[in-house]
Image: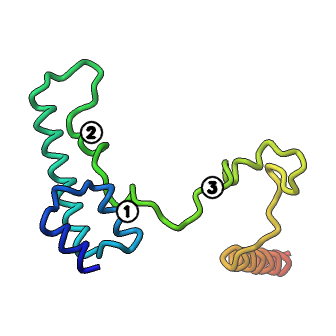
Amino acid sequence: MQGIAQKILENPGRYSVQELQQGVQHGIIPAYIAVPLIQEKVQQQKQMMLAQTMQQPQVQGQPPIAAQVMGEAQGLESMPTNLPQNYAGGGIVAFADNPDQPVREGMPSTYETPYDRMNRQNREREEADLQDRMERTV
């Protein structure tokens, strides 16, 4: 590992951001060497893009310079993860058009949270107290 790290430090301009990212991901390049270089290269790319866009006149319908720079910047979000990427689409909304689903829209929930239970018990106590008071006054 020391050999590749030395080569990178001697000539950092030779390696692209993607090559450095892949080297870190595969364990070939230590992160403490590659990450500062990646940050520096991304910053240089941003500055170059900003300089180019400043030289060009703003074209109608083109997004502002800041939006372009932010859209083209690469960060942690662009690095691959080991998390699954193929989730079922739609989430809870996906159940809306399924006629065979066990729960229908507008059905009361049978699950009672502790907060709901406390409110129900308080309401029942208040109703019982009110009923007792009304019976005593009659």
User: Which residue corresponds to mark 2?
Assistant: 67
Query: Are circles 3 and 1 on residues that touch, CB within 8 Å?
Result: no
Q: Quadrant of residue 1?
A: bottom left
Mark closest to the chain's N terminus, 2 or 3:
2
Q: Nearer the viewer, residue 97 or 110?
A: 97
Q: Residues within 10 Å of mark 3 (few under 14, many from 20)?
A: few
Q: Position of residue 23 (x, y in %)?
A: 34, 66
Disc 3 to disc 1, C-alpha distance: 22 Å
Give the CA distance from mark 2 to mark 1.
Answer: 27 Å
Q: Amino acid at mark 1?
A: Gln
The disc label shown at residue 22, or none: 1
Task: Please give left or right for residue 34 compared with residue 40 in the image.
Answer: right
Q: Amino acid at mark 2?
A: Ala
Residue appearing at x 23%, y 42% in the figure = 69
- Relative to 19, say whether 126 is above or below: below
Q: Residue at position x 70%, y 53% from top?
A: 92
